[in-house]
Amino acid sequence: MEQGGLKILRDRGYIDWCSHPDELEKLFQEERVTAYVGFDPTADSLHVGHLIPLMGLAWLQKLGHKPLLLAGGGTGMIGDPSGKSKERNLLSIDIIRENVAGIKKQLAHFVDFDCGENSAVLLNNYDWLGDIPFLDFLRDVGRYFSVNYMIAKEHVKSRINDPEKTLSFTEFSYTLLQAYDFLHLNRVYGCKLQMGGNDQQGNIVSGIELIRKVDGKQVYGGTNPLLLTSSGTKFGKTEGGAVWLDKERTSPYRFYQFWINSEDSAVEKLMKLFTFMPLEEIAEIMGRHTSSPERREAQKILAYEITSLVHGSDSADMAKRASDILFGGDFDVKDLSPEMMKTLESEAPFSKINQPMPISLAELMIEAGAASSKGESKRLIKGGGVSLNGTKISDEHHELDENSLLQDGYVFLKVGKKRFFVLRHGE
């Protein structure tokens, strides 16, 4: 693909700030730029909060440039104090190695590790930081950083000026380690651009300055926006915690639902950031969305695209279908694969049927929590608002027997347009 593209990264929202923008734009036009993003492997999975820098690198690679993904095996043992009010729990190298191994397979959904000269490279900074003697590091790196400069950083000031908070020397030294990473990557890989969240600007500038002072070279930095919801909460956080990229931590269905619930005011920005759709196509989608926002077309397209990217198209199809079923769509029982049944069981109100067959539908509704009494059950059935395994039932005396059960004893009960219940008979 033709090289260039700083403007494209800006237009899609990946660049909030960059150093020497005119020079960097020229660099993008004249050569294949090697850029890196670092992440601390504090868990064995990435989460939605990591997606902006990852997608930024993915777009950079699509534009012909080379991405480096730096796992902070060394810095992860310290913990970046930027944006933090207290020190993180320090991780052992064994746990960090396990986390890096878990994350590696997720990265391949975003960047190509085998596509020629601009193939992505995954690195672990423990491989060089772990070998540096302490005295050598103080002499060769520490002497370029004044304490005055480091104390002036906002995240440092906020900690040392608050008697309720502390800042250890371990955390205080973090910016030196990150700066050295940039120096190492520039020397070994020719890396000229570091990208990260807006809270990383100070650390990025430290690396730029270190390279200038030590090697006399000009390198660059760029920062991504940190997204917040309209309520001010950090994007990617829900009542249940972080939204993970690992399907064992956050199911594809719940991942899909997270994006479906995107706010109207944010969905265009999210499509630009988290999909590979051309801007012209996004503009067309938003035109239709603005005319009929109640259809949530933009959110559905966003949810499908990003779920396909992270979990694959099969999982995205299943999440979409499960969402359609649970939120009002009709369904044919022949479409319910064993995997889909398991998905619905985990996401809808679920009950075990412990009574022997046959059992009246009215009693089953009480068992499921769909009605509080037989009288209410019968009124709902007579009113035409109840369906069983996709078939509407109007007989208030209807009974279920063994022939009513689907594979593995499942029964799917729908009451009204949006109340969906899963039951299963037997063990």
Image: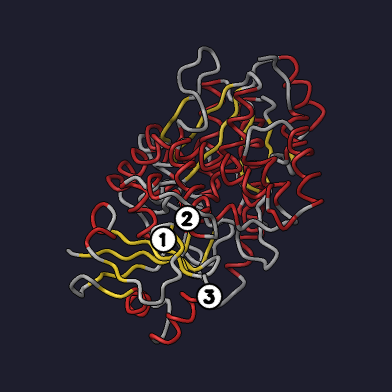
**SS class of the residue under badge 1?**
helix
- Which circle's residue, 2 or 3, is located before the other in the chain? 2
Residue positioned 61% across, 38% down in the render: 207
User: For the residue carrying disc 2, how many other residues have a C-alpha within 10 Å: few (<14), some (14-19), or many (20+)?
Assistant: some
Q: Residues within 10 Å of mark 3 (few under 14, many from 20)?
A: some
Judge by depth and name the residue closer to the eye, 215 or 308.
308
287 or 14: which is nearer to us? 287
Badge nearest the viewer, 2 or 1:
1
Q: CA distance from mark 3 to mark 1?
A: 27 Å
Q: Position of residue 201 (x, y in %)?
A: 66, 46
Which residue is depicted at the point 62% across and 41% down?
274
Q: Secondary structure at mark 2?
A: helix
Percent from the top left, x then y, of residue 13?
A: 73, 41
> What secondary structure is marked by label 3?
loop
Evaluate if marks 3 and 1 touch, with contact meaning CB atoms under 8 Å apart.
Answer: no
Q: Earlier in the sequence, mark 2 or mark 1?
A: 2
* Identity, as a three-letter code, of the amino acid under mark 2: Arg
Classed neighbour count for the residue bearing mark 1: other residues with Cα under 10 Å, few (<14), some (14–19), many (≥20): some
Q: Which residue is mark 3?
A: 383
Q: Which percent across, then down, holds residue 426? A: 18, 64
On-image quarter of the N terminus: top right
Q: CA distance from mark 2 to mark 1?
A: 8 Å
- Mark 2 touches mark 1? (CB < 8 Å): yes
Q: Which residue is mark 2?
A: 254
| Sequence-earlier tag: 3 or 1 | 1
Q: Residue 133 at what x, y percent from top left? A: 37, 38
**Identity of the amino acid at label 1?**
Glu
> Which of the two discs, 2 and 3, sits closer to the camera?
3
Q: What residue sits right under mark 1 in the picture?
A: 347
Left or right of 346, for residue 215? right
